[in-house]
Amino acid sequence: MMGRTRNRKYSPASRLAVQAGLPPLIRMLMKRDWQGRQHLMGRGGVIVAANHLSYADWAAMSLFVHEAGRFPVFWIKSSAFDVKPIGAFLHVLGQLPVRRGEADAALVLKPSEEALAAGECVVIYPEGTATRDPQLWPMVAKTGVARLALTTGASVIPVAVWGAQVILPYGTTRPHVLPRKMVRMQAGPPVDLSEYAGKPLTRAVLRSATNVIMADITTLLAQLRDEQPPGAPYSPASPAGDVRVAAADDTDRLAEAEPS
C-alpha cells in the first residue's frame, strides 16, 4: 500500500455533504447497468482510467466510484479552478488541476502523486477530452496517465462507459433526462504494466504503456457495445477526415506527451 501524506488539503465535511446529496440526484437522472465495481474496492491509492464521451460521464463516474466505497478525485483542466465560485468548490473537494502545456511533467503530476499517496481514487480521462471519433471509440490518448502510474506504482483500473452521450451529447448544453436513459459502465482488473516496471520513462515506454491502458478500456467498451472496435485508434490531428494511427512513432507525433 502506498504511504500517506499530509500535503493534501481539502474539506472532509464538504466531501461528506457531496456524498450525501449528489448520489440520489444522479440516480434520478439515469438508469444504470454497472459491473466490476469490486475492482475499485479496498484501500490505497488507485488510478481509474476511462473513455470519455460526454460531460455526463462525470456524474456517472462519480456515482460509480462512490458506490464502490471511494471518493472520486478527477483531473480537471486548471482554468476551471479560476472560475468563481466553481474553483473554490473544486479546491475544497480536493480535485486536481491539470495545467496543460507546462514543460516540467514532475511538477504537473505532483498533486496527483500526493493524492495517491494519501490513498485516494484519481480519475483520469486519458484522451484529455471527449472523443472525436465519429463512431465514439477511444481516440489516441495522452501519456500522463502512464507516467503517473509508472512513477507511483499505483494500480490502473480500466473503466468503460456507454450511454452517457445520449443524456448529454458532446457540444450540447441541454440534457435529455426524460425518459431516463441507460448508462452502462464496466470496470476491469488492474492493467498489467509489469513489463514497464523499473524502466526509464522514455517517450517510447510512456507511449507503449498508454497504449496498453487504452487497449484494456477499448476491450471493455467493445463488450458493453457488443461491437468490434477498430483496429487502430482515431486521431483528431488531421481535419481531413477519419485518421487512424497504428504505428507507435505516429502516435508520439500526433499526441501530446504531457499531461493527460
Image (cartoon, grey):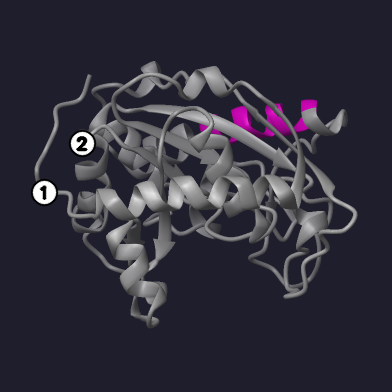
Q: Which residue is mark 1?
A: 7
User: Which label was assigned to residue 188?
Assistant: none
Residue type at tag 2: Ala
Which residue is located at x 68 percent, y 58 percent? 54
Is 138 rendered above or below residue 44?
below
Q: Of the residues under marks 2 and 1, which one precedes in the sequence?
A: 1
Assess disc 1: are there few (<14), some (14-19) or many (≥20) residues with their C-alpha within 10 Å of its C-alpha: few
From the viewer's perspective, tell me whether residue 165 is left or right of residue 13: right
Is 61 rendered above or below residue 46?
below
Which residue is located at x 42 percent, y 61 percent? 76
Which corner quadrant of the image does residue 3 belong to?
A: top left
Assess disc 2: are there few (<14), some (14-19) or many (≥20) residues with their C-alpha within 10 Å of its C-alpha: some
Which residue is located at x 36 percent, y 44 percent? 203
From the viewer's perspective, tell me whether residue 70 is left or right of residue 182: left
The answer to whether residue 94 is visible is no
Q: Secondary structure at mark 1?
A: loop
Q: Position of residue 109 (x, y in %)?
A: 26, 51
Tell me if label 2 and label 1 are in contact, CB under 8 Å: yes
Q: Which residue is mark 2?
A: 118
Residue type at tag 1: Asn
Where does the magenta region start and end? 211-223
Q: CA distance from mark 2 to mark 1?
A: 9 Å
**Quick check: is 251 in the magenta stretch?**
no
Q: Quadrant of the N terminus?
A: top left
The answer to whether residue 114 is visible is yes
**Quick check: is 213 in the magenta stretch?**
yes
